[in-house]
Image (tube, helix red, strand yellow):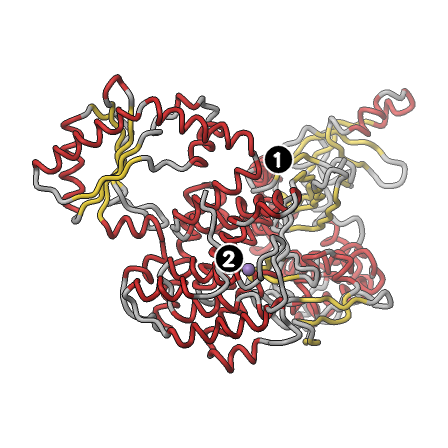
């Protein structure tokens, strides 16, 4: 591992820059150093060195990546705004070094504020994506990676707990980020250092094995080397050979993830051939396959099929002397630079300053890359990403504590409040963004700090919020609140909605007619009473459009037009007769008799297709249960109930006639921010309406979601359940509520 030299001035940095042969504004870099030096004066690192040695080291790594003057200045200044807030600020940095440097420093300062807890995988993924998304300029990420690399190189002086958390964070966030950007060199060093802190013994073992094996077989690689060299020279290929290229961590990971012993690592020995042209890559490959027997299935052409992070090379594994396998990687210099430096190779090896437009192109490319990358790692995730277009359509904002909350793009501060907790949303009276009071329909941007102002005196959400919010999660939670808290009000609102509908018909009706119409529609839609229907309409649990046709039909039937057009009506009635004749029966035939008053038991909500039985209730006709309903099983045991059971079955055709049976189902799932959105989206997709939704957290942190949905029949129900079971984070789906 590299033990960095400590520099407290920029002699070395300036020398590196001069030797690079690229153009730099050395005066500006000198000024940035002097400014940072004066600000950090009197500050020390835990190791006891002057603090300035850290920004200098970061600037040296940044220079090594070939980044430009502004990046080097930003690296020198990266901790000033954060750590010397009493003596400087962003405005002053901008005034001294220009808008670009200030923008980079600002981006770096914001990243520092991100709070990373290591508990939740989804959360880590959010952070990685946010780092990419919030960096208006990709150079911010490059400098941040250099900063992290230097902190890792000097981690030895920190306490054990700090070493662990820093190493873990590096492994989970920064190394994958470097990988996504194709920055293999930085990625490998980050991983190697991290693992040496996370598993010092395992790491040391691998190191020892590597040294031992190279010691034993030194002659083997040397002979491979010279044979390949001779062969390529004979064929007039201009090339450079490199050996011993596997990183300790890559071997460590193979051993532990594939549970292999060190001696089972196939491609432990590797040889890299770097040539001038793409054609020579294939020529060299042919020559090597001539010399050694290749292992089938191990040849990979990443030249014609580059990896998502732009990596290109030919890989093959062949058998050498004594049956020892080794891997050969063949690439051009261009490919080599991209493999080592990824996106940054653009700066290091292509001359010229980058214009703003170029930068945007870069960023767009990075976003696309991040998307494609996830497709490679996890096909399921890719599907869901594709569906909700998550990367491009998410905003990442902070809570005041620094937690990252991911919201669909366009979400308002109300959506944010409900994403935190329904109790926060319900008590919300206002919001602040970056410390400033904002209107309640403000849409926060990635990187902003959103604070919800709550008051226990709040009377709950306003109905207008339903028009403002954009996430179904917030909408459902608001409806839920109205459903629970405001039944009386909802009923009034619901009546009003129906009244508006009736006004459209432009015909007088009596109160008795109203009651009959609404009563029938309510019952046909599975509501226990008209009030329940009003309530549901009132809190927005069902749109009036869902029952508009039925209301109209019922209205026409009950409130006769003054001048009936007799012959036409008859024809009409014949046409619509089929679904109507079962009105009140819900499609159930009891003991061979049609049209008898039945209701569906709320305890088991039978669906067409379920085996059912009728039970004569004391208050209300016959209630229909599933045959295996626990209540029925219980009642059957009691002799006094013996003659209260009547046989019942579904009428033929009931399934198509009645599209709105209620079904209860319970989803058990891992806690996830996108769970409700995924469930509601899947249901919306299947045109299934949600009548009620209610979630609770279990002791183990998982989620129980009770859903009441509309359903046609048992087959429909099964198809809904199997779709829901396939959703991300869902553990199980069962019928009924436990
Ligand atoms: Mn730093």
**Side (left or right) of 583 relative to 94:** right
Element carrying mark 2: helix
Beta carbon at label 1 within 8 Å of ligand 1: no
> In the shown orientation, is residue 146 left or right of residue 543?
left
Residue where numbered disc 2 is placed? 147
Image spot of residue 619 (x, y percent): 89, 40
Residue 641: image location, x then y, percent: 88, 25
Upstream in the sequence, badge 1 or badge 2?
2
Inspect this view and state whether residue 690 appears. Answer: yes
Name the residue tied to disc 1. 714
Write down which quadrant ligand 1 falls in.
bottom right
Residue 71 vs residue 542, the one in the foreground: 71
The residue sitting at the right extreme is 640
State the image quarter where residue 362 is shown: bottom left
Tell which of 87 and 169 is nearer to you: 87
- From the image, which quarter does the C terminus lie in? top right
Residue at mark 1 to residue at mark 2: CA–CA distance: 59 Å
Residue ID at (37%, 68%): 68
Q: Is residue 48 above or below residue 72?
A: above
Residue displayed at 39% across by 47% down = 184
> Horizontal and vertical percent for residue 485?
83, 59
Q: Secondary structure at mark 1?
A: helix
Q: Which mark is residue 248?
A: none
Q: Is residue 417 above or below residue 123?
A: below
Instruction: Mark 1 and mark 2 in contact? Answer it, CB < 8 Å.
Output: no
Q: For ligand 1, tell me if the residue under mark 2 lies within 8 Å.
A: yes
Residue 581: image location, x then y, percent = 66, 45
Q: Nearer the viewer, mark 1 or mark 2?
A: 2
499 lies above or below 223: below
Q: Quadrant of the N terminus?
A: top left
């Amino acid at each position: 591992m590299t033990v960095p030299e400590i520099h407290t001035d920029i002699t070395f940095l300036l020398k590196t820059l001069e030797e690079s042969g690229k153009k730099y504004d050395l005066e500006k870099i000198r000024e940035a150093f002097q400014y940072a030096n004066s600000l950090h004066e009197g500050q020390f690192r835990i190791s006891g060195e002057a603090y300035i040695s850290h920004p200098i080291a970061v600037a040296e790594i940044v220079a090594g990546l070939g980044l430009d003057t502004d990046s080097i200045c930003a690296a020198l200044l990266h901790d000033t705004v954060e750590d010397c807030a009493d003596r400087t600020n962003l405005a002053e940095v901008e005034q001294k070094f220009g808008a670009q440097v200030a923008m980079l420093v600002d981006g770096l300062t914001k990243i520092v504020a991100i709070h990373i807890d290591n508990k939740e995988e989804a959360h880590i993924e959010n952070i990685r994506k946010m780092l990419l998304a919030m960096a208006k300029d990709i150079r911010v990420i490059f400098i941040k990676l250099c900063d992290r690399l230097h902190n890792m190189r000097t981690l030895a002086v920190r306490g054990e707990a700090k070493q662990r958390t820093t190493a873990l964070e590096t492994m989970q966030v920064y190394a994958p980020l470097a990988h996504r950007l194709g920055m293999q060199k930085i990625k490998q060093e980050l991983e190697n250092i991290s693992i040496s802190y996370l598993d010092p013994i395992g790491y040391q073992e691998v190191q020892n094995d590597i040294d031992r094996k190279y010691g034993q077989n030194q002659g083997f690689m040397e002979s491979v080397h010279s044979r390949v060299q001779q062969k390529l020279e004979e064929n007039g290929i201009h090339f450079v050979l490199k050996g011993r290229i596997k990183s300790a961590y890559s071997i460590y990971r193979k051993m532990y993830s594939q549970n292999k012993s060190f001696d089972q690592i196939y491609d432990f020995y590797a040889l890299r051939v770097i040539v001038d042209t793409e054609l020579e890559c294939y020529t060299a490959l042919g020559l090597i396959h001539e010399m050694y027997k290749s292992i089938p299935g191990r040849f990979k052409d990443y030249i014609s099929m580059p990896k998502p992070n732009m990596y290109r090379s030919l890989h093959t594994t062949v058998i050498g002397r004594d049956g020892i396998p080794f891997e050969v990687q063949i690439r051009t210099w261009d490919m080599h630079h991209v493999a080592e430096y990824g996106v940054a190779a653009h700066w290091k090896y292509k001359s010229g300053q980058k214009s703003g437009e170029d930068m945007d192109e870069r960023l767009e490319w990075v976003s696309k890359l991040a998307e494609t990358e996830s497709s490679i790692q996890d096909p399921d995730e890719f599907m869901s990403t594709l569906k909700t277009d998550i990367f491009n359509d998410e905003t990442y904002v902070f809570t005041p504590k620094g937690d990252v909350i991911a919201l669909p793009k366009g979400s308002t501060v109300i959506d944010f409040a409900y994403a935190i907790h329904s109790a926060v949303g319900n008590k919300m009276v206002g919001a602040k963004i970056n410390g400033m009071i904002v209107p309640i329909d403000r849409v926060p941007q990635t990187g902003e700090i959103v604070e919800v102002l709550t008051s226990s005196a709040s009377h709950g959400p306003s109905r207008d919020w339903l028009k403002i919010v954009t996430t179904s999660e917030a909408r459902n939670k608001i409806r839920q609140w109205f459903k629970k808290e405001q039944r009386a009000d909802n009923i009034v609102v619901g009546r009003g909605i129906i009244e508006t509908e009736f006004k459209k018909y432009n015909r007088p009706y009596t109160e008795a007619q109203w009651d009959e119409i609404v009563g029938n529609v309510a019952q046909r839609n599975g509501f226990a009473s008209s009030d329940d229907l009003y309530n549901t309409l009132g809190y927005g649990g069902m749109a009036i459009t869902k029952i508009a046709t039925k209301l109209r039909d019922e209205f026409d039937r009950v409130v006769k037009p003054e001048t009936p057009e007799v012959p036409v009506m008859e024809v009409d009635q014949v046409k619509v007769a089929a679904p109507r004749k079962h009105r009140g029966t819900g499609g159930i035939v009891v003991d061979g008799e049609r049209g008898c008053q039945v209701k569906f038991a709320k305890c088991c909500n039978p669906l067409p297709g379920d085996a059912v039985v009728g039970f004569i209730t004391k208050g209300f006709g016959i209630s229909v249960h599933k045959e295996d309903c626990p209540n029925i099983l219980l009642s059957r045991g009691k002799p006094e109930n013996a003659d209260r059971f009547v046989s019942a079955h579904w009428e033929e055709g009931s399934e198509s006639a009645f599209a709105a049976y209620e079904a209860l189902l319970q989803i058990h799932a891992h806690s996830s921010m996108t769970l409700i959105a995924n469930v509601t989206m899947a249901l919306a997709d299947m045109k299934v309406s949600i009548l009620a939704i209610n979630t609770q957290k279990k002791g183990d942190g998982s989620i129980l979601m009770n859903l009441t949905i509309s359903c046609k029949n048992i087959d429909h129900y099964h198809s809904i359940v199997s779709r829901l079971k396939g959703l991300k984070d869902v553990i199980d789906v069962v019928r009924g509520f436990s």
